[in-house]
Every structure is written in C-alpha cells, then in structure tokens.
Amino acid sequence: MSNPSNLKRTALYDSHLSLSGNMVDFGGWEMPLWYKTGAVKEHMAVIKAAGLFDTSHMSVVTVSGEKVREFLNFALTRDISGQRPGRCGYSAILTKEGFCLDDTIIYPLSDNRIALVVNAGMGAKVVEHMQSLPGGDRLVWSDLTGQVGKLDIQGPLALKILKDLVRNPDKLFEQFPYFSFKGDFNFADTGVFMRDGTPVLLSRTGYTGEFGFEIYLPADRAVNLWEMLMSEGEPFGLIPCGLAARDSLRAGAVLALSHQDIGPWPFVNHPWPWALPLSETGGFTKNFYGRDALDPASAPHTLPFAGYDPRKVDTESARVLCEGEDIGRVLTCVADMAIGRVDGGIVSVASPSAPAGFSPRGLVCGFIRVNRALESGSRLVLKDNRREIAVEVVTDIRPDRTARKKLSSML
C-alpha cells in the first residue's frame, strides 16, 4: 500500500488494517491506537487473559568493544558493573544538564557486547550521543532500527499460549526469572527458535506491569509470528492491543513514558529510583554522565496519582492545585479501567481481595510534576479548561500485578 504520509510502518501495517486498527503517528511511525475491540477491552484482556502488541517501532542498538561495559557504566545512570549476560536492566541516558535523553532496557549479550533497546526514532540519536562521550567513538555501534521486529505478548495466559509455539519449551522455560532473556540479536547465533524455525530473542519483560514476554525477531518474520500467536491464542482470549491500552496499562503499573514523564528536566525526585545508583542514604554510588547536574534540593518532583472515578483532564492545559495554589503540571492522565475503590483503597479485578461481583468503573491515574515533595495520601485537584478532578498522591496504583510471578504459577 502507498504511504503518502511518509510515516514509517512496521512489517505488520497491513495486518493492523485488516483488524480495523485506528492508525496514528507515534514517534514518526504509523501505529495502531486501538482495534475494533476498543481500548477498554484490550486493557482488560491483558489483566485477565492476554494481549498482543506490535512494538517493532522500538529501536535496538548494539555496541561492542573491549571496554564496552566500563564505557556504558559511565554513559548510563544504572550501575551495570555486575549485570551478567542474560539479565536485563532499566536505565536512563542523560545529557550533561542531567536531563533524560531517553530511557533504555540494557541487554548484556556477552562480556564485551551489549544491546540497548530505546524508544521509537531514538536509535540514531542515542548512537550520536554515545559516540560524543569519552571513549564512545572507539566502540563498534550498530543501529538495528527497522531490521528487528518486536512482538509483546502480555497477560497471565501468555505462557500457556507461547509454550507450544517454541522449540524445546521445557528447557527454555526451566529457569526464566523476571527481567531475564534468552537468545541474541544476532539471529544467526541466537539458539532460541519458534516452532517453525524463526530465530528469536525472548525476554521476560514488558510495558504493562503484567506477566508476559517480549519477542525480538527478524523484521521479515514478524507477520508470520503474529499470525501464529493470534491463532494459538484465540482459545485463550488473546486479542490484538494498540497504543492506548499500552498507555493505560503502563500508567497503572507506575511505568514512565519517555519524553512525557521523563524528559528535559533533572532526572531525580521520581518514582523510578532503581534507574539511579543510590545508596541507602540517598547518595550516588558511582559516577555517570550528567550526575553533577542532579541536585535533588532544587529539582521538581514527579509523583504518581490516582483519582476516584475515570474522568480525565487534558494534559496540554491541566495544572496541579494544592489548596488552591498552582504547584505544577500533569504529565500523564489516563484511566485504568481494571481498578476501583473499595473501602477507600484501590482494588483490581485481579485482586484476590476483590468483592464478589466486583466490576470497577475505572480510576484516573498518571503522573504529575510539582515544585515540592508531597506525602502519599496528599489530596490535590487537577484542573484543565473544562473540569476539575480530585486525586491523591500514591506510591502505587494497580495492585496485584502479575509481572513478577514465578513461571510455575502461570501454567
């Protein structure tokens, strides 16, 4: 099909159209916002069964060299000195001002070869930034944007769907903890294959807060795998999911969206402390690029919030009011339709403590950036050009998420 918009398209573009995908511009890529099922049903499928996402717009960058780990330990906020091959890690890439250029999942493939998965349109920018740092130009960089397809199967039934589609499932899933991976981005040497021989890197990660896997494969094999997963997953309630469900799921799981919840302001005072090398007293345990610009005393605070019904405000105009005083702005504002309030607390449809017949209307949630620290439970008002909604600062949003559950409990 012709492309007059000049937006990039993944190999699954025609598949999305055939499923009535509502296509939008996302980071220069034409991606499905939702399908005919609608964003609410897609969100709920990931909580109760499974959802399938095309995330091939993400960029994969590999870097190799004798001192690659030493270099990345300075270039990234996270301390990766002890991160062994096969274990993933979340980190930020900062500018000299201490602002977040992008966030990344780190994949150590060997002692001297590491992959970084970054956001749509960021592959070339990240490589350029890295090569400008001391020692970065002496390493070998490869931007695999567009060459690697990526499908995410997320939800409590993901393993039941996937296990019959891979070779040697008993061995593959024998040991597979959260935030680990098996395989390689050099698909000729990956050692992990789908049933039909498609080479993959399989990662027990995702962007929903729920149990699942991310599957990396050659881009030209993505359509075939998508169709295999859809067919295998149909009896389990698997449905395709778009960016809207991805956004509401990740917000309910207190996960940041790069260039929205983290961006051109100091990367401190936020709910993602594991991305920083912090000691028990709050100091930094290693040097990293941008560290000298991070001053918690003068930086704004990014905080999660949850409301009392699903009504939202427009993030373009919404302000945060504390006892009538304007103290900041709203970064993300979505409705997690799987949660509601019971006796003052937040309960999920997946919560063992949910009352019989619990059918939530959903709760608004997301992130705010404000000029002061606020305790959990602090009451605020979000106000845009149309309405005001009451919310509270929280430390967590959607309870009883499944991402960290043992594989044995998901069969």
Image: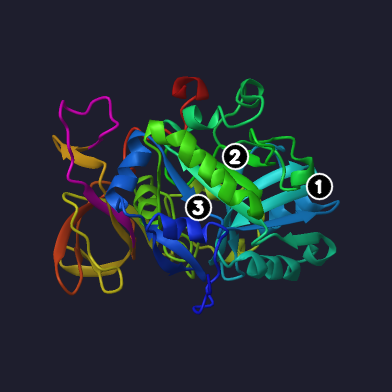
Q: Which numbered disc flags the more N-terminal residue, 3 or 2?
A: 3
Around disc 3, counting alpha carbons within 10 Å, would you say few (fewer than 14), some (14 to 19), or many (20 or more)? Answer: many
Q: Give the left or right position of residue 132, taking residue 46 as reference.
A: right
Q: Quadrant of residue 109?
A: top right
Q: Position of residue 148 (x, y in %)?
A: 65, 54
Give the total of numbered labels.
3
Asked if the magenta segment contains residue 277, the reply would be no
Q: Which residue is mark 2?
A: 203
Q: Give the left or right position of residue 137, taking residue 277 as reference.
A: right
Who's the residue at 60% across and 68% down the image? 95
Callout in the foreground (1, 3)? 3
Q: Which numbered disc flags the more N-terminal residue, 2 or 1?
A: 1
Amino acid under disc 2: Ser
Q: Main secondary structure of the magenta part?
A: loop
Callout in the foreground (2, 1)? 2
Callout in the foreground (3, 2)? 3
Q: Quadrant of residue 234?
A: top left
Q: Which mark is residue 112?
A: 1
* Outermost residue to the bottom: 4
Q: Gap between marks 2 and 1, in whole Å?
A: 20 Å
Closer to the camera in the image, 409 or 268: 409
User: Is residue 79 visible in this depiction of the protein?
Assistant: no
Q: Position of residue 218 (x, y in %)?
A: 67, 51
Amino acid under disc 3: Asp
Around disc 1, counting alpha carbons within 10 Å, would you say few (fewer than 14), some (14 to 19), or many (20 or more)? Answer: some
Q: Which residue is mark 3?
A: 54
Magenta residues? 347-368
Q: Secondary structure at mark 3?
A: strand
Q: Secondary structure at mark 2?
A: strand
Q: Position of residue 82 (x, y in %)?
A: 70, 39
Q: Position of residue 90 (x, y in %)?
A: 57, 48
Who's the residue at 56% across and 37% down the image? 204
